[in-house]
Image (cartoon, rainbow, N blue to C red):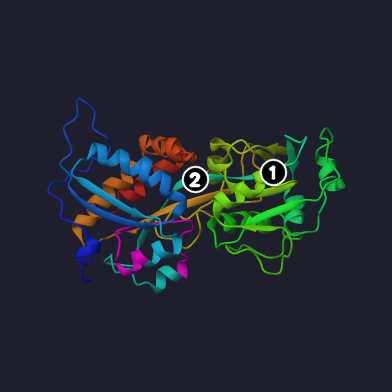
């Protein structure tokens, strides 16, 4: 049996156990008897949802529980869970099957892990072109803009999809992330899947070095500022950060779809689970090239990751209760309010609840 997680990371024992006390207490409900400290780390994309949504809501209902989440990045979060430094991780991608098989997961008794797509965020394609407030683009045209093949806003490929727009004879400035980013990973994954002939650089978290031109900016805020303050600019960013910038409608089938929480959640439901996973591992194989009605295919899915069997029973109890709150309708609404994320559907929630119930 593996040794329980070290004191600095493993957290205090619970003084009470009640399987259904994770949801915030009502006036009629008994006060929570949960207590202890829980540590998590990982995706910065989840930070607003974690701090202002989930942690705030859960600690309000469970006053003797302290949850700490370090937005150190997806890779760091996964490594911290494997090393037993935290009890759960947030990650903008699921563990790969070979990574799970290789292990080790020092916080767990086995290499069986729980992965739940709990945070869904549409990625908006933002632009700033004088006189143009609405813009339709298909995947191939978008790929050719970002790979540098289309360089002017009145290019025939853009004009054909926007017959009513007054497109200027103006250079396109395509803005991309300069840092390694889950947002870049999901955006390029969409381009690679939906326009493979135009986008040959693959699905990558770091902007391909072979693509010259455009403008690089640090972080989501940097991209948003570069697009906002530039001339003829276009970029990609978490939709919650788009502000008052204009956004592209993306061609799906024969329609052009604007991003929305509902459309972002719909693409997740329209996509299958990855093969070769355990029952509690809900890694989604996003169908970026879907033509299903009403789906928005450029989304970021961020996962909650924990052990199926914990080495420390205290961690098991708190993680199970915390994850239960996060996937609940109330928890998802809290994240939507705090971070602008798309609440998971009832269909996905049913699968998530079943996965959380496996934690012990």
The secondary structure type at the circle numbered 2 is strand
Quadrant placement of the N terminus: bottom left
Which residue reaches farthest bottom?
A: 102
Question: Which mark is drawn over residue 127?
Answer: 1
Dot placed on the residue nearer the N-terminal end, 1 or 2: 2
Quadrant placement of the C terminus: bottom left
Instruction: Give the extent of the magenta segment.
Output: 80-98
Position in image of residue 258 (x %, y %):
65, 37
Position in image of residue 346 (x %, y %):
44, 37
At x 61% / y 47%, what residue is drawn? 225
Q: Which residue is mark 2?
A: 120
Q: Residues within 10 Å of mark 2 (few under 14, many from 20)?
A: many
Q: Nearer the viewer, mark 1 or mark 2?
A: 1
At x 41% / y 41%, what residue is drawn? 349
Front residue of this view, candidates 266 and 25: 25
Q: Is residue 9 above or below residue 253?
A: below
The secondary structure type at the circle numbered 1 is strand
Magenta segment: does it hold 97? yes
Position in image of residue 270 (x %, y %):
57, 45
Magenta segment: does it hold 89? yes
Position in image of residue 67 (x %, y %):
27, 50
Which residue reaches farthest top?
A: 28
Front residue of this view, candidates 112 and 265: 265
Q: What distance separates the C-alpha of mark 1 from that of mark 2?
A: 22 Å
């Amino acid at each position: 049996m593996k040794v329980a997680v070290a004191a600095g990371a493993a957290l205090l024992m619970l003084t009470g156990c009640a399987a259904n006390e994770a949801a915030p207490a009502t006036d009629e409900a008994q006060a929570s008897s949960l207590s202890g400290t829980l540590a998590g780390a990982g995706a910065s994309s989840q930070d607003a949802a974690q701090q202002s949504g989930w942690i705030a809501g859960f600690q309000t209902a469970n006053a003797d529980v302290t949850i700490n989440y370090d937005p150190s990045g997806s890779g760091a979060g996964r490594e911290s869970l494997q090393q037993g430094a935290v009890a759960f991780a947030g990650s903008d991608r699921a563990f790969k099957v070979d990574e799970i098989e290789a292990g080790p997961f020092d916080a767990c008794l086995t290499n069986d892990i729980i992965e739940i797509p709990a945070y869904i965020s549409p990625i908006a394609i933002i632009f700033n072109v004088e006189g143009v407030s609405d813009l339709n683009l298909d995947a191939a045209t978008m790929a050719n803009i970002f790979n540098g093949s289309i360089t002017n806003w009145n290019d025939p490929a853009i004009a054909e999809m926007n017959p009513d727009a007054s497109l200027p004879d103006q250079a396109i400035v395509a803005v991309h992330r300069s840092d390694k980013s889950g947002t870049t990973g999901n955006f390029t994954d969409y381009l690679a899947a939906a326009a493979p002939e135009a986008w040959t650089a693959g699905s990558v978290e770091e902007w391909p070095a072979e693509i010259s031109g455009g403008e690089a900016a640090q972080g989501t805020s940097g991209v948003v500022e570069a697009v906002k303050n530039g001339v003829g600019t276009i970029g990609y960013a978490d939709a919650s950060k788009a502000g008052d910038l204009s956004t592209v409608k993306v061609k799906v089938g024969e329609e052009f779809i604007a991003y929305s929480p509902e459309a972002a959640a719909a693409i997740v439901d329209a996509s299958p689970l990855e093969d070769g996973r355990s029952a509690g591992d809900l890694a989604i194989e996003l169908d970026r090239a879907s033509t299903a009605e009403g789906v928005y295919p450029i989304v970021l899915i961020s996962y909650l990751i924990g052990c199926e069997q914990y080495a420390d029973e205290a961690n098991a109890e708190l993680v199970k209760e915390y994850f239960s709150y996060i996937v609940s309708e109330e928890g998802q609404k809290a994240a939507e309010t705090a971070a602008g994320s798309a609440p998971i559907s009832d269909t996905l929630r049913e699968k998530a609840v079943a996965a959380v119930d496996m934690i012990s």
